Amino acid sequence: QQETIGALMVVDAAIVVCEAGQEKALAVTRLMKELDDLGIPYLVFVNKMDLPEAHVKTTLEALQGMTERPLVLREIPIREDNVVTGFIDLVSERAYKWEESAPSNLIEIPEQVNGRTEEERTQMLEALADFNDDLLEQLLEDVVPGAEVVYQNLTHDLQDGAIVPVFFGSAEHENGIHRLLKALRHETPEYTATLDRLGLDAEGDAVAQVFKTQHGAQSGKLSLARIWRGEFADSTSLNNTRISGIFKMFGAQQKKQSKATPGEIVALGRLEGVQTGDTLSVSGTVEGPAWPAFLTPVYALSIYAGRRDDEVKMATAMTKIIEEDPSLSYGPNIDTGQHLLRGQGETHLRIALDRLKNRNKLDIEAEIPHVAYKESIRDAVSQHARHKKQSGGHGQFGDVHVDIKPLPRGSGFQFTDSVKGGVVPRNYIPAVEHGVKDYLVRGPLGFPVVDVAVELTDGQHHAVDSSDQAFKTAGSLAMREGMPKCKPVLLEPIFQINISAPQAFTSKVQRLISGRRGQILGFEPKLGWKGWDEVSAHLPESETLDLINELRSLTQGTASYEWQFDRLQEFTGKEADQVVAARGA
């Protein structure tokens, strides 16, 4: 998904491919929204139209409900025995019969679709006339515009992002592909129109924009870039880094060339310090189009090297993987101590891990992350503890009385002292606090302790045998003996989540949340997203670990969510007992 966004930032036009059918069409609505927001011209190709149940009209209706741009049908199907076997081009008014993996054959327009051809062509022309007064005047005067005029209007309106032309076919059998390629060649905008759309001047310093980064075993780092203006020669310095090779990419193959010219997409070799989204120029000061924020991770795996020798290599290799895909992130979870690889879903992370292993011959293990459970207490207790040890020479002696009390949720940890008369010398009090904190790292249930107040109220010391270490040990001992008496309780993290999905799936999303111990806060139309809802809820962290997988399964891959930590909440019952038991094991 991140690669798609990167590519969209430098294209002149895009093709949205969807399967025929109302529900299946929903799968591309997020992409259409992205294109609409970026103002990118695009066409729609409805695939698998050779199937008996395929209907372009119902697909069109579903797609139109997701975009403000009018969808303009460019062709209508010819059916034989309820199976699409060809199409009628509404501009040229010619009929074609599909052939298996070959160009279509020109045929006479079947009589049964003659009337529909005229009706659909009129609808197409009326849609175009909304953006051209001359064409509107012709239609009002019953003047039939020629194909040349219609093509000009289609090209102009597509370039302006005013319409979305719709084609159909069957990619598996190469049906409709030739017609689609002709539209790409003749009707999509030139790169100079893209410059205007992005607000870039065609004159000035040579400028390129990096939309993808990749690392090869032989080639090293390659920055894939679109040249917006000017020429770049090999060895030119861009953003204070010298180009080490300019390559044209043909799949996995590379062809070296001496320069890159405006409009080209090339790979620039070994530009260290250059990242995806960077704008490159000789001066290094040219500002390019704003780059969208990288996708927020919604899935994580805990990973670690299977062999100690691989730990350093893994860290280096991980840096390259994240450079290639900025929607990945990697780092330690300070609550659990695990190192987490985060991304957009299970498949996304598995692909990243396979790259990591295969490219670098690493042994890497992955597992579901631990939940950052905490624990606290319900009752207050006064506890006395003495640490005394004598083994010849100086001994160890520390004696403390502490009050342990619960605090309101979110208060953290507080340590105070009310010792009087110097029974515990001032210089030993920090050691007592240190011992208390050491214990709180792992409480009686086995988790970090929060929202607890500890007050040192009394104690004793020995002029010779007392020390920082003795009072630190006494403080820890007081907590170890007192905390189990305070009715410890498990706390689980609760996340605030906002799920975005097409309205057709809102009820499924709500049932999913309820089935995962969630609390639905409400839902409303998603601002700026036609036909979408946003569902807000509170959900335990443990229920979010694989949430994105089921969410996408229920919504044909369309739904997404954002999350943030909300609070810690008491967790009791059988499931909580299982968590504590697993921790003890």
Image (spheres, rainbow, N blue to C red):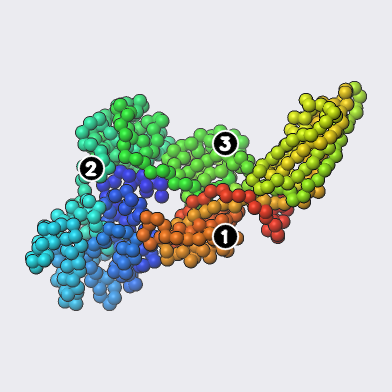
Q: Could you classify mark 3 by the number of other residues whose Cα lies within 10 Å: few (under 14), some (14-19), or many (20 or more)?
A: some
Q: Nearest the camera: 148 or 394? A: 394
Label 2 secondary element:
helix
Q: Nearest the camera: 332 or 495? A: 495
| Residue 306, above or below 109 | above
Q: Earlier in the sequence, mark 2 or mark 1?
A: 2
Q: What distance separates the C-alpha of mark 2 from that of mark 3?
A: 49 Å
Q: Amino acid at mark 2?
A: Asp
Q: Could you classify mark 1 by the number of other residues whose Cα lies within 10 Å: few (under 14), some (14-19), or many (20 or more)?
A: some
Q: Which residue is mark 3?
A: 310
Residue 409 point in image, percent of width and height: 66, 48
Q: Which residue is mark 2?
A: 196
Residue 452 point in image, percent of width and height: 72, 43
Q: Amino acid at mark 1?
A: Gln
Q: Earlier in the sequence, mark 2 or mark 3?
A: 2
Residue 21 point in image, percent of width and height: 35, 67
Residue 561 point in image, percent of width and height: 48, 53
Q: Are marks 2 and 1 in contact (CB under 8 Å)?
A: no
Q: Which residue is mark 1?
A: 519
